[in-house]
Image: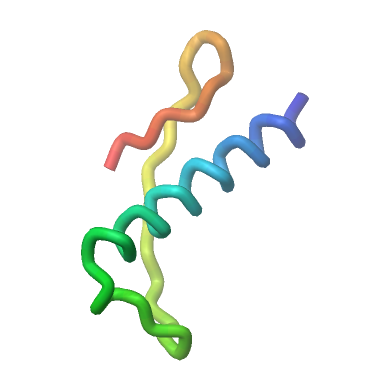
Amino acid sequence: KWLDIHQRTCNMIREVFESAVVVHPEMHCSSSRAIYGVDVMLDSSFQPKLLE
């Protein structure tokens, strides 16, 4: 189901950025409008994997 895969992918990406802010609090800026790119692959069970 694509909606489930999409939600898992969004959650994974959100967790990455939330973790980065915990380790580097100076990265948190509510007015930031930076653009980030991520590469995601689905494994054979359709679980998202962050590549970079």
When the figure is inspected, residue 10 is found, relative to residue 33, above or below; the finding is: above
The one nearer the camera, 5 or 24, is: 24
Quadrant hosting residue 5: top right
Horizontal side of residue 25 vs 47, given as left or right: left
| Percent coordinates x, y for residue 23 in the rendering | 23, 59
Residue located 76% across and 36% down the image = 3
| Percent coordinates x, y for residue 26 in the rendering | 24, 78
In the picture as drawn, the residue positioned furthest to the bottom comes out as: 31
Residue located 37% across and 36% down the image = 50
Q: Quadrant of the C terminus?
A: top left
| Percent coordinates x, y for residue 4 in the rendering | 72, 31
Horizontal side of residue 20 vs 10, given as left or right: left
The one nearer the camera, 26 or 47, is: 26
Q: How many marks?
A: 0
Q: Quadrant of the N terminus?
A: top right
Horizontal side of residue 2 vs 24, given as left or right: right
The one nearer the camera, 15 or 1, is: 15
Residue located 57% across and 18% down the image = 46
Q: How is the image coloured?
A: rainbow
The one nearer the camera, 23 or 27, is: 23
Quadrant hosting residue 45: top right
When the figure is inspected, residue 24 is found, relative to residue 14, above or below; the finding is: below
Residue located 49% across and 29% down the image = 48
Horizontal side of residue 7 vs 35, given as left or right: right
| Percent coordinates x, y for residue 13 in the rendering | 47, 48
